[in-house]
Amino acid sequence: MKYHDPMRRALLTWYRKHARDLPWRKTRDPYAIWVSEIMCQQTRVDTVIPYYERFLSRFPNPKALAAASEDEVLSLWSGLGYYRRARLLHQGVRELVAQYGGAVPEDPEGRRSLPGVGRYTAGAIGSIAFGRCEPVVDGNVARVLCRYLGIQTPLGDARTEKRLWAEATRFVEGPDPGDFNQAVMELGALVCTPREPDCGACPLRRSCVAHRTGCVGTLPVPKKRAAIVRKEVRVALPVLPGGEVILHRGEAALFGGLWAPVSVDGADPAKLRDAVRSLGIDVGPMRAVPGEVRHVLSHRDLRLTVHRGRARGFLPSERVRAFLPADLERVGVSTLTQKLLAHAGWGTGE
């Protein structure tokens, strides 16, 4: 299919009229585009904007980010979630500075050699920053292509993924590949939405297989999802006489590997006490705070009980530290940790 195909032309015309005014669309800086693409993964755009602006204000170029500590990076990511993204971005930029002097390589192989840069991110940077005809496939693109082409195999299926990348590669060929890729993503975000798509406003409706055959509501075919499992978790908040709370580097899956309370699965308080002591924390009796904190992850419905107690001392290490409320503003903590601290009344004088 050639670039002058009506589908491509109609989509680009629509995009130039309806594209949202987003800060990362005002630059062709590959580093800034890289940051925006990582932040936007699994996160709403309106949530990302203030984080993106603060992040680039603090780390305006790769060398500034590479020189930062992990805690500095995570403190600016705090609340955005999926903290592994921040670590991989940090690692990738450090590798970029070490191997390329901070200049993002134009060739896709060079970009994909960097930690955290997969096929999608490399394609977004290549097409938007460098004007290269490189495809992207994210959730929005997959939904648009599945409906437009009438793809009947499930998302996540190897056949579907292969077909989607092949079609995206075919369609991106031509002028303005960056705008084209963003146009497909924008169409999926604003018009060809998962529920109640606005087919009347779609520039592709006349040639869309799903619209023509009346199966928009059944495409794309979803992949099977694991059942959500309810799980009990106990967490400890040992507080020193000076009011500092003792935290450790938390579980990656639950706390993103950020500073967090000690936690154990299950309902046994003795197991929690053993976990606290194993980290060199000397704490007196810990009492459960009334009520529980609920936190829902993709496949887990967590019910967390907070146990608060007075700590007599601890062994500081890279994994265990004490914090006052002001200290937490300089390091990364997850939204869940913030909820747990608030539930226990820590930092409020209670």
Image (cartoon, grey):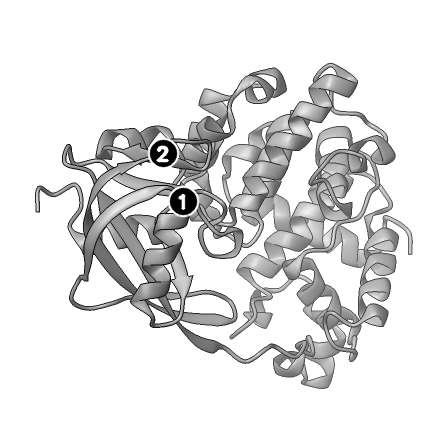
Q: Residue at left 73%, top 14%? A: 101
Q: Position of residue 311 (x, y in %)?
A: 22, 43
Which residue matches tag 1? 279
**How crowded is the residue under tag 1: few (<14 C-alpha within 10 Å), some, or many (20+)?**
some
Frontmost residue, 41 versus 208: 41
Task: Tell me the element at label 2.
Answer: loop
Residue type (three-letter) at the residue carrying disc 2: Leu
Q: Please say if the residues under marks 2 and 1 sit with CB atoms less than 8 Å apart.
A: yes
Q: In the image, is residue 189 above or below residue 93?
A: below
**Residue at 78 percent of width and 72 percent of height:** 157
Instruction: Work out how far the residue at label 2 is from the one at label 1, CA to CA, in angstroms.
Output: 8 Å
What is the quadrant of the N terminus in the image? bottom right
**Residue at left offset 76%, top offset 51%:** 9
Element marked by disc 1: loop
Residue 315, label in figure: 2
Residue 335 coordinates in the image, percent (x, y)? 36, 50
